[in-house]
Image: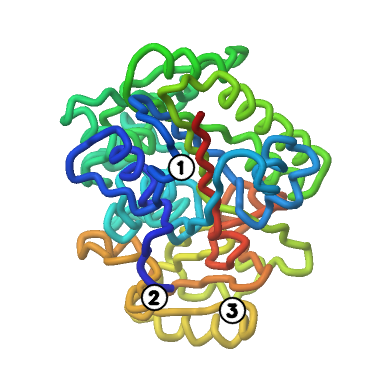
Amino acid sequence: MSAPTPGSLCDVLPAAAALLGVPDAVDRLAVTESVAGQVDRIAVVLVDGLGWHLLPELAGSAPLLASVLAGGAGRMTQLTCTFPSTTPSSLVSLGTGAQPGEHGILGFTLNVPGTERVLTHIYWRSDSPWAPPPAQWQPLPTWFERLHRCGVAARAVLPALFVGSGLTDSAYRGADFRPSNPGDDYAQLVIDELRAAPGLVYGYTAELDTAAHVFGIGSPQWHDAAAGVDALLTRLVDALPANAALLVTADHGGLNVPPQARVDMDTDARLSAGIRVVAGEPRVRYLHTEPGAAVDVQATWSALLDGRAQVYSRDQAVATGMFGPVDPGHLARIGDVVVICPGDTAVLATKREPAEAARLIGFHGGATAVEMAIPLIVFAL
């Protein structure tokens, strides 16, 4: 996997900033070609789990997205998310315009170097007594900060639960937050912000991804979630002011993992031998080994998962370029051994992770096309 070229999730906010006239912002995605008139406000909505290759399957439940696929609404192009194809990494890549190796959010969970602790990014509270401060763990500036420095308002309409978290600070640092609560009309909150003042308005919805994880891609619940996403986007498009544009993208796709494709490292003594800390997620595992055990662990995993996983040393994984350029200060966050599942395999760690992780049906995180390919849909009057 090579470093992102034009067509990356990293390019979305720079393109929006360029459309808003921010100096030095580059539109590598040709968004300006899809917007006929002048705009002074842009909504960027990230739909968690809206993979490019999943669009045909959900189109039957999503009239607007079906029209986009048929060429009747908006303009859609294919992008790639960054690797790993997991929400924390992607959200920070979106916010910073940088790859995980640069911003340091290199997975769903990461070992905090020098400790036995594993940081789960979606539960990371900035006031935790042991978790790293967000500005140290993710030191890069965000595009929300850059917009503000240029006098362009940047607002984020997010669930109130997200405000104050380490991940929110890492991805959206500098944004003015507009919290939403259960029962709020989320579409209307975004519409009101877009109408209120020029600038950037960011929105996020997780229902599609949640349904994929819990019930599986293609399930009735997943289709219901797709219908909900489509209704949200339809309301935003219908309310779009003449001087505004709407950009819709995603953080990753996904796939269902059948029971026979699951490997539990905690029920096989050969796979758990020599392991000190396990991080990452089932599609991309970071194995932090006991002193001197890395070579044996890599050899054992390579033999036992031959054909089902790619097993790298840390140096080998970094050398592929899959993480982008890796800041030396972030290297220790990557396992001594890195295990990537190229097919439909998932590596569980049932004694080290919450029980619900093993009950999930839909997964992502790997480097397959169905996980990495995402859309960018531009709507403008």
Give x and y (percent) for residue 163: 39, 24
Which quadrant holds residue 201?
A: top left
Q: Is residue 143 above or below residue 93?
A: above
Q: Which residue is mark 2?
A: 317
Helix, strand or loop at disc 1? helix
Q: Residue at x 26, y 60 (%)?
A: 330
Q: Answer with mark 1 or mark 3, whichever residue precedes in sequence.
A: 1
Helix, strand or loop at disc 2? helix
Q: Amino acid at mark 3?
A: Arg
Q: Amino acid at mark 2?
A: Ala
Q: Residue at x 50, y 79 (%)?
A: 311
Q: Is residue 295 above or below residue 21?
A: below
Helix, strand or loop at disc 3? helix
Give x and y (percent) for residue 143: 27, 39
Q: Left or right: 141 with respect to 99?
A: left
Q: Left or right: 365 with respect to 307?
A: left
Q: Which residue is mark 3?
A: 270
> CA gap, disc 2 to disc 3?
22 Å
Q: Answer with mark 2 or mark 1, whichever residue precedes in sequence.
A: 1
On-image quarter of the N terminus: bottom left
Neighbor class of circle 2 (other Cα within 10 Å; few <14, some 14-19, many 20+) is many
Q: Amino acid at mark 1?
A: Ser
Give x and y (percent) for residue 374: 55, 53
Q: Residue at x 37, y 45 (%)?
A: 92
> CA gap, disc 2 to disc 1?
38 Å
